[in-house]
Image (tube, grey):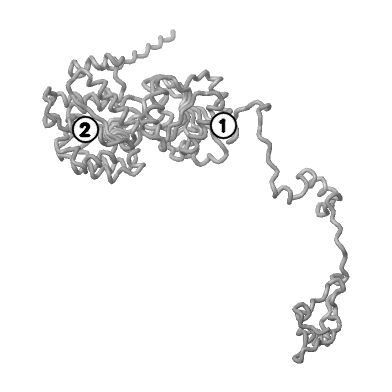
Amino acid sequence: MQEPTPNPEPTAPPPRFDTLPLDPKLLRAVAASGYASMTPIQAKAIPIVLAGRDVMGAAQTGTGKTAAFTLPLLQRMLAHENTSMSPARHPVRALVLAPTRELADQVAASVKKYAQQTLLRSAVVFGGVDMKPQTEELRKGVEVLIATPGRLLDHIESKVAVLNQVEYVVLDEADRMLDIGFLPDLQRILSYLPKERQTLLFSATFSPEIKRLASSYLQDPVTVEVARPNATAATVEQRFYSVTDDDKRAVVRRLLRERDLTQALVFVNSKIGAARLARAFERDGLKTQALHGDKSPDERLKALAAFKRGEVELLVATDVAARGLDIADLPGVFNFDVPFNAEDYVHRIGRTGRAGASGLAITLVTRDDSRMISEIERLIKKKIEIEPIELDDDRPRRPRRRSFDDEREGPPAAERSERFERGDARRPPPSRAVAVPADPFFDKPYEPVGSGSAAWEKSEKGADKEGKAAPAAPARPGLSPNIRPKKKVASLLGGGRA
């Protein structure tokens, strides 16, 4: 008799936030936000941060890294909570550095949401906008400051941001800050901070440069990883389609219909490409906004807010939107252009399938993208299958213009091929034949110039010294009758006698 197969052990439920040693005010704010259970990165990182250790957190994007450092940060800051109106009682004690304005604004929104039942003050500063409102807010005093490196240095140099009492530092998306050249700014900012502090470094990917940065500024850090570095979320369905550049827009429209996607984030590699593609989708009848670095911060934040509210169907963006943006329930992401950097692929598709939800990531691949696809395969350690996709043949296509070079090339390729088979490929077609007059001079063999050359040279000198016209020189031997002799310069100028 066959022994019964033992039942598999039930999976343990994810730990809940109320099991953490957090203040009740923070727990109520978390519950009001709709969260009850922690994600793996939160369950591993929060207890270590609360214990006062430095942390290097590695997890794929969309797993809740923001709450993993925000909640412990606020718990530590509650010890300095007070009702005083004096700015001196509200110095900056926690600093969060983010690479982009959008990510800084998102972190600031999370801090305000979780601290809404406390007396803690927070502010966000980033470039591209007027400094005066930020300066006024900093002068009133804030405990938690979220900033981009460049604008923070501006406030430090103007003596508005004083960081000598900072106890808690977070470097969010640190690899992106290094990619866009913020390492010198980071080093300057960290030099203004007290040496006794707690430092956290969170990122979806860890490069050797990031590890060197951590060894320089973190003290005995604990590395927290919940997935293999550079891995993509298992909840995201990844599809790759072979297309041509002319068919990309039609493929996006078709997949939006077939997959019943109400919204999608479309990534391109250039700012001008994002603007042009957004206008093209608008002409196709889709509510579209563009998000790229040439837009003002206010325009970018408004476009992102409209997309989050569901008022925009397509958000065409550069990689400025690839890092850290939390868009709830985003059904799909399109890589209209394959990213130049393989790590950006991980961040792009991480905008969908967040917090355990399912998502779809579609990449449109042309013949010129083979090298970048190979780099993505090496990064995610998966074989990429590129699928063909068929489009309707009755789509309107622009006719090819006949250029000047085409006119010079002669008849079409089919006609040239037919003539080649007949053996007269070098002969022009009868309709294009041009009659050329024959010249017997070019049909004669070469003959050296004889004694008549001296007389010919004398005739070329024109009149003699006495002003008398030179006698007519004999025709140059071998000269064709079709070549008219040169006229005498003296006769042209009126120098000859009647």
- In the image, is 93 to the left or to the right of 386? left
On the question of residue 48 being in view, the answer is no
Q: Amino acid at mark 1?
A: Lys
- In the image, is 429 to the left or to the right of 118? right
Q: Where 464 sits versus 129, above or below?
A: below
Q: Residues within 10 Å of mark 1 (few under 14, many from 20)?
A: some
Residue 174 in the image: state x and y as whole percent: 31, 37
The reply to whether callout 1 and callout 2 are in contact (CB within 8 Å) is no
Residue for point 21% across, 28% down: 49
Of discs 1 and 2, which sits in the foreground? Answer: 2
Q: Residue furthest top?
A: 1
Q: Amino acid at mark 2?
A: Glu
Front in this rendered view, residue 237 or 397: 397
Q: What residue is shown with label 2?
A: 136
Helix, strand or loop at mark 2: helix
Q: Residues within 10 Å of mark 2 (few under 14, many from 20)?
A: few
Q: Quadrant of residue 435?
A: bottom right
- Locate the N terminus and report the quarter of the image it occupies: top left
On the question of residue 89 being in view, the answer is yes
Residue 342 in the image: state x and y as whole percent: 44, 38
Q: What residue is shown with label 1?
A: 248
Residue 488 in the image: state x and y as whole percent: 78, 79
